């Protein structure tokens, strides 16, 4: 979490990728809060 938090305040777009059911959405909701968008392909 500490490594992730240091990148949150940059202007870069953040993308969370990984296999199914590994907690990607949980991680995004927990860390990004109101700046969170979800795209399902």
Image (cartoon, rainbow, N blue to C red):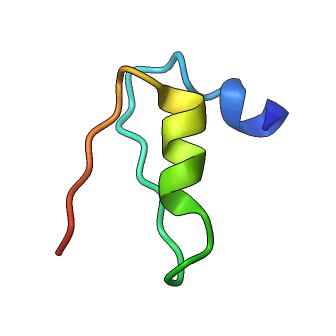
Q: Nearer the viewer, residue 2 or 23?
A: 23
Residue furthest to the top: 9
Split into 4 quadrants, where in the image is the C terminus?
bottom left
Residue furthest to the right: 2
Q: Residue at x 56, y 51 (%)?
A: 26
Q: Residue at x 41, y 52 (%)?
A: 15
On the image, the x and y values in percent for residue 27 come to: 59, 48
On the image, the x and y values in percent for residue 22 come to: 62, 73
| Apparent side of residue 28 relative to residue 38 in the rendered image (left or right) | right
Residue furthest to the bottom: 19
| Apparent side of residue 29 relative to residue 5 in the rendered image (left or right) | left
On the image, the x and y values in percent for residue 12 come to: 39, 31
Q: Residue at x 47, y 55 (%)?
A: 25
User: How many callouts does the rendering have?
Assistant: 0
Q: Nearer the viewer, residue 35 or 9?
A: 35
Q: Residue at x 26, y 50 (%)?
A: 38
Vertical relation: 20 (above or below) 22: below
Vertical relation: 1 (above or below) 22: above
Vertical relation: 15 (above or below) 22: above
Split into 4 quadrants, where in the image is the N terminus?
top right
On the image, the x and y values in percent for residue 16 come to: 48, 57
Q: Nearer the viewer, residue 20 or 14?
A: 20
């Amino acid at each position: 979490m500490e490594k992730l938090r240091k990148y949150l305040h940059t202007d870069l777009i953040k993308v969370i990728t990984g296999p199914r059911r590994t907690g990607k959405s949980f991680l995004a909701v927990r860390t990004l809060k109101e700046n969170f968008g979800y795209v399902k392909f």
